[in-house]
Image (tube, helix red, strand yellow):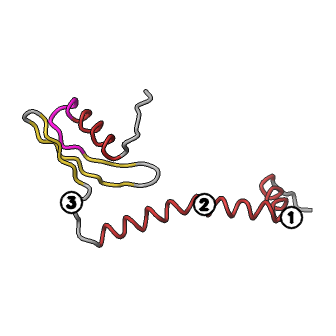
Amino acid sequence: MEESTTYDRIVQWALNHPIISIIVLICTVLIAISQVRDGIILIYRFFCPKSNDGTLIIEYADETIKIEEKLISQDFDIIKIHATTHLLGMRAEREWLMKKYPGYKNCM
């Protein structure tokens, strides 16, 4: 007689209860939707000419800071800040957050 592992028993139990399999399938699809959406946006941006929509220019006393949006997704945003000092970069990041997400509050 062949011994079954814990994994085999769990899979066999899940297959005997179709509602569990349906719930797992629905959860997998819900998780994949945002990743597919982000992938489609990246492919579109790769093949389409780059526009200036993702660029923000901020003027401080004698400094011009350029902020480029590299990736905007539902999970996180990646931006590139062209600043000469750390303080100016942090200040520009806060200003970008206020323009991009008006209701943002820093909870730190």
Is 42 within the magenta?
no
Name the residue furthest front: 103
**Image position, residue 68 (x, y; %):** 24, 51
Tag in front: 1 or 3: 3
Residue 16 is marked as 1
Tag in front: 2 or 1: 2
User: Given the image, on which type of amino acid does mark 2 rest?
Assistant: Leu
Look at the image and give the residue range highlighted in magenta: 81-88
Name the residue furthest left: 62
- Mark 2–mark 1 Cα distance, whole angstroms, equals 23 Å
Counting residues from the start of the chain, the first of labels 1 and 3 encountered is 1
Residue that appears at 69% across and 64% down: 25
Name the residue furthest bottom: 47
Read off the residue under disc 2. 30
Residue that appears at 39% across and 65% down: 41
**Image position, residue 55 (x, y; %):** 22, 53
- Circle 2 SS class: helix
Query: Local crowd at mark 2 within 10 Å, few (<14), some, or many (≥20)?
Result: few
Residue 52 is marked as 3
**Marks 2 and 1: CB-CB under 8 Å?**
no
